[in-house]
Image (cartoon, rainbow, N blue to C red):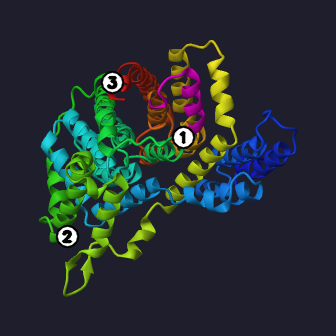
Amino acid sequence: MGLSKRIGLVLGPLLFIVIINLPELLTGKEYANAVIAVALWMIVWWITEAVSISVTALLPLVLFPSLDVTGIAEVGANYGSPIIFLFFGGFVLALALEKVNLHKRIALNIIRITGTTPNKVVLGFMIATAALSMWISNTASTVVMLPIAMSVIGLLVNDADGFTKDDQNFALSVMLGIAFSANAGGIATVIGTPPNSVLIGLLENQYNIEISFLKWMTFGLPFSAILLGICYLVLVKWMFPNKQLQFKASREVIQAELKKLGPTSGKEKMVMVIFGITVFLWIFRTVINGIFPDLGLSDTIISMMGAISLFAIPYNFQKGDFIIIWNDTHKLAWGILILFGGGLALANGMSSSGIVDVVSNAIATSELSILFTATLLIILMLFMTELMSNVALVAVLAPVVAGIAIGLDIPMLHLLIPVTIASSCAFMLPMATPPNAIVFASGYIEVKQMARVGIILNLISVVLLVLMFQLVLPLVF
């Protein structure tokens, strides 16, 4: 165990004990000390990763009832929130895509269609990765794309002129393009990246505000596409141009990979149909509910319908062959689901103890401008997520940001959405996101190269998010 983990392991409970025994920190707020103590313990363990971040998320389940903040039933309800089942259904759909190799077929065909000149290959990899990251985890989409990218780069390493400067620039563009587009792609949908779901859960649990799948896509998809385009231009036109590079063999690599997959199987077609119906229902849910009000469809119900279909509809009735069986779920990110629950429990504790009210009142009486405050929060979230889990960070900061929005007397969605999206815009460091770490491990990228491009994209992301706060979200909400 590293030094930071050892320090964190001791410091977390130590801070808890100190805070819990201090005089009342917030006058008139009975359980504020207890909630602040638990929050600090969780933050220290989340930042240092002294134990698994999912284990840390279980602390409210033990500590809140013990400290009389909330009862065990009330705390436990956060871990079974509808938003958790929305994400569970999304995980199962993603698992089916991966199990039948449909995700790889989709990615390869996107790359094949975009073309095989160097810049078009980079664009193809980026579009394919982003498209996958809208529906499956950004880690999985990066893992799928990396070996294909390595095969294409291998052609350049072994060609007649060796690994030239243009070859190196191409390799950097492809590798960083995959990582950055995995991060950007997840922004587009509610299930694309965990921070989005943490926010949706907070809004539904604490404030009875619902953002539908389609509503999120109305701003998430354009933002994701713009960010993807900027990443592409920064990589191939500015930072790592490959003007002299010419190669045709990449087409053969793509064709060879597709050939390995063979013709589209019956299971792939079945998954495609179930996945397509689920996405259709997500997008047109409000229209369907308008025509058939008794249905009462929600995004969570649709997600679970899709998941149950994959378990329950046999591909071969005689053989009892199903697309997904329960044993497959050992690959599911159960820890992320627990992390959602812990985040919602912490948010609930902060709200019920009056901490959020104190923050909102403090902001209301300050003289900071709304635009300055929003920009500061976006920058804080974006650069902090370079160093700690973005899900954990959103779980801690989102309730506070909601309080700030109330204090500023602005719709909380206008502030919460860009601050949450900022947590997915970490481009600078390998440890910031799993895609960054995976492509860094390829050996083609140095930390300074990732940081040099990443700082530019981080700053551009701040500008885009401030514009979203100022111009886009007031039109949508």
- Between 389 and 164, the residue placed more toward the observer is 389
State the separation of the CA atoms marked 1 and 2.
37 Å
Q: Which amino acid does label 3 sit on?
A: Leu
Helix, strand or loop under label 3: helix
Q: Where is residue 22 in the image (x, y as percent from the top left)?
A: 87, 40
Look at mark 1 in the image and give the residue it sits on: 394
Residue drawn at x 31%, y 61% is 93
123 and 449: which is toward the camera = 123
Instruction: Identify the main secondary structure in magenta.
Output: helix
What's the residue at 24%, 74% (across, down)? 313
Per the image, the residue denoted by label 3 is: 475
Circle 2: residue type: Lys
Q: Give the range drawn in magenta.
A: 399-413
Q: Which amino acid does label 1 sit on?
A: Val
Q: Mark 2 or mark 3: name the one nearer the start of the chain.
A: 2
Of label 1 and label 2, which has the lower sequence position? 2
Badge 1 element: helix
**Label 2 belongs to which residue?**
267
Left or right: where 264 falls relative to 197: left
Is residue 234 shown above or below 3?
above
Q: For mark 2, does the 10 Å Cα neighbourhood hold few (<14), some (14 to 19), or many (20 or more) residues?
A: some
Q: Can residue 252 be seen in this view?
A: yes
For residue 229, side relative to residue 477 (left or right): left
How many marks the image carries: the answer is 3
> Based on the displayed image, in which of its 4 quarters is residue 124 positioned?
top left
Residue name at image x 60 percent, y 44 percent: 347
